[in-house]
Amino acid sequence: MSTVIEAVAVSRAVGQPLDRIDGHAKVTGAARYAADAPIAAPLHAAIVQSTIPCGRIAAIDESAARNLAGVVEVLTYRNAPRVPVLSFDFTTPVTEELAPLQSDAIAYDGQHVAVVIAETFEAARAGATLLRIGYERREAEVSLDTARTIEHPEQWFGDDAQPRRGDPERAYNAAAVRVDATYTTPEETHNPLEPSVTVAEWRDGELTVYDATQWVRGTRAVLAKSFELDEEKVRVISPFLGGGFGCKGFFWPHPLIAAMAAKVTNRPVKLVLTREQMFTSCGYRSETRQRVRIGASREGRLQAILHDVLAESSRVGMFVESAGAVTTMLYDVSNIAVTHRIARLDVPTPTAMRAPGKAPGTYALGSALDELAYACGLDPLDVLRRNDAAVDRSSGLPFSSKQLLACYERGAEAFGWSARPKAPRAWREGGELVGWGVATATYPALRSPAQARVTLSTDGLVDVASATHDLGTGMYTILAQIAADELGVDPRAIRVRIGDSSFPVAPVAGGSMSSASVGPAVQDAARRAYHEAVAIATSSGESALHGLPERDVEARDGALRSKADPSRAVTYADLVRLGGSGAIEALGSAAPGDEDERLSFYSFGAQFVEVRFDEELARLRVSRALGVFDCGRILNPKTARSQMIGGIVWGIGMAMLEETVRDPRYGAVVTNNLADYHVPVNADVPDIDVLFVEEPDLAFNSLGARGVGEIGITGVAAAIANAVYHATGVRVRDLPIVPEKLLGAGPAAG
Ligand code: MOS
């Protein structure tokens, strides 16, 4: 663009490992999460859930609950406000075609069937236990083993769900080396530290909701439609999240129940889901069964991949755990067949969980490639390298930027890969078997249209506002860094406000797209504000920069300055005063163009893992992990590194600990607490190192940054399973890799 753009201050904050600007508020308790909503004396709501998987409510006895001191109201399908059943789309992101408390039908164990509203949290909880509900139960199908309704979705989120190219069956059958293996991953549950929460208040026919959501705009749209209100009459506020990971991305029934409760009682209502309820109320990662067939040459060159995925969804909502999605693009292979089959079960609806599809998919594919390497007698890393895809074979398009080979190289060097003994079970140290594994990480680079507002005011404050979110990822800090560079101010002088549906539009904080979508919008808004400030500075007679051409002005150290004589300066606060309108305010926007038609946008990485197995104690530990990532330009190495470490920790959980177990007859989750649902703790987590191979992806957006949220978990489970095979000679194809699956380990096993 113009010379003025080039005159904008050179980047100083972006790229720096800045501490979180919201860190102080968080550690001092000043940060207000949804349950801390500034609402005096709300009523408390406790949800009652179905205890059958399928059937109908036959009788409800509310008398004991209603007679309990403090109970104000009980809502069931018999007396709840009527709301329409909505269908999922990207404007009304309802996960289930099942408006809550509208009928006696039961679609899964854990479905919300009543809410008890009381003066205190304790009375609401006690009242909930006093509700007597009789059911007529029908036979349920809750397992992939017995599923009778299997669907073959054609598309999922705009992608072909059954992609094919070449002649995969023929190429597979003709191949010199074949791998045919089935891998399974169990249901997993997000378990953010902060449970789902809604505080709802009606005033003069307008609804305000404090909600733990990754998408204030999506939540607002569903609530507005449900109550037949203009969207302007609904405000959704969610400034801080204690994690989300996808379970707060789309719309679940509980905010609607909280809003109904507030409407009926005409009082503000606070609804906090219990940890137990979190296992059935806001999605989970579907179980997957993945058969992978690979045909290759003796040199390990891929000739065919057939990847068949079976996953589950509910009767009332469709979610496809698209584990085969990246199989079509990740390697250089001419013949591909990917299928996704979805079993409809009497269970809650699964949803996006960190790297949906890609986390289980990279486990199966990454394991199968390791099996291929052993079948060919090759180093697994060599097999990955020699099948590197120079272009995206699924579309034929070049990648906008791809540094995967460099990730393999840097990782191998940093990890010391060349010292790896080739044979499995060949390495012992101090009585433990040691093994190393490697796998590829990938995640698509996504973007959506977004807007942001930058406001400069007379007190010198720079305010940035957008309806995006910080799930704990670092968005507050990154947006401040971006605005700071455009305006030449210190990022700590910037106030970022996010998580409010009244702010300029932003997409769901999911799909690792927030930085790449909202960042450029903030940059655009800040540039516009800068231009306005320069126009005032050069035209106002009272400005020290009066009469200077715009190109001779630059932003630096909190002021506009003459490039030739930096002591000639005007602060933004003075410029706002000179401008005379009280503020300089600029709305910025950014949106993807037609670049998707010319280029393929993905991030990549390489995961290296060391495991140690003590055969006598049957103790398996990850002792070292290294992730090397290519995500374009890294906006903040500290928050990006934290994202990757978090992803790798979760990959350890996925590989070795996590499993949501259902009762096979009734579908009830029996691991519905953090004692029985195992997540990694400090003792499970070794030193993790993270490296970035940085190449700004300026074809993707003006910042050159792709997302860093989800890729961190991808490939980790495969690298661990591969390391376990290398250490023990046992190939575990069913996650999680608990020690009993390694008992009897020996050279003949696997
Ligand atoms: Mo993410 S699983 O798209 O919140």
Image: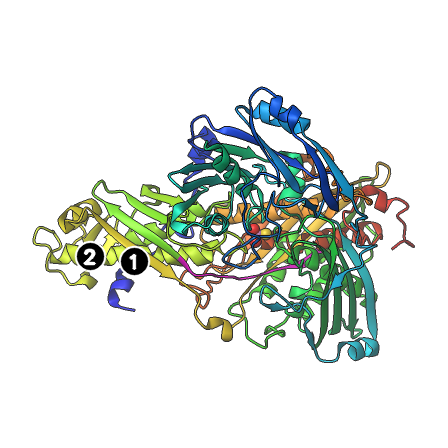
Q: Farthest residue toward the left?
A: 541
Residue 568 appears anywhere in the view: no
Q: Are marks 1 and 2 in contact (CB under 8 Å)?
A: no
User: Can residue 443 be found in the magenta stretch?
Assistant: yes
- Which stretch is magenta? 438-450
Closer to the camera, 15 or 579?
A: 579
Horizontal and vertical percent for residue 594?
A: 45, 73
Q: Earlier in the sequence, mark 1 or mark 2?
A: 1
Residue at 82% in and 67% down: 179
Q: Residues within 10 Å of mark 2 (few under 14, many from 20)?
A: many
Q: On the rendered structure, is 485 left or right of 331?
A: left
* Amino acid type, label 2: Val
Locate residue 324: give its quadrant: bottom right
Closer to the camera, 273 or 288?
A: 273
Position above or below: 83 against 120:
below
Q: On the rendered structure, is 272 left or right of 110?
A: left
Q: Farthest residue toward the top?
A: 69
Give the spatial CA distance, label 1 vs label 2: 10 Å
Q: Secondary structure at mark 1?
A: helix
Horizontal and vertical percent for residue 680?
A: 68, 39
**Circle on res. 407:** none
Circle 1 residue:
527
Residue at 72% in and 68% down: 339
* Amino acid type, label 1: Arg
Circle 2 residue:
534
For the N terminus, which image quadrant?
Answer: bottom left
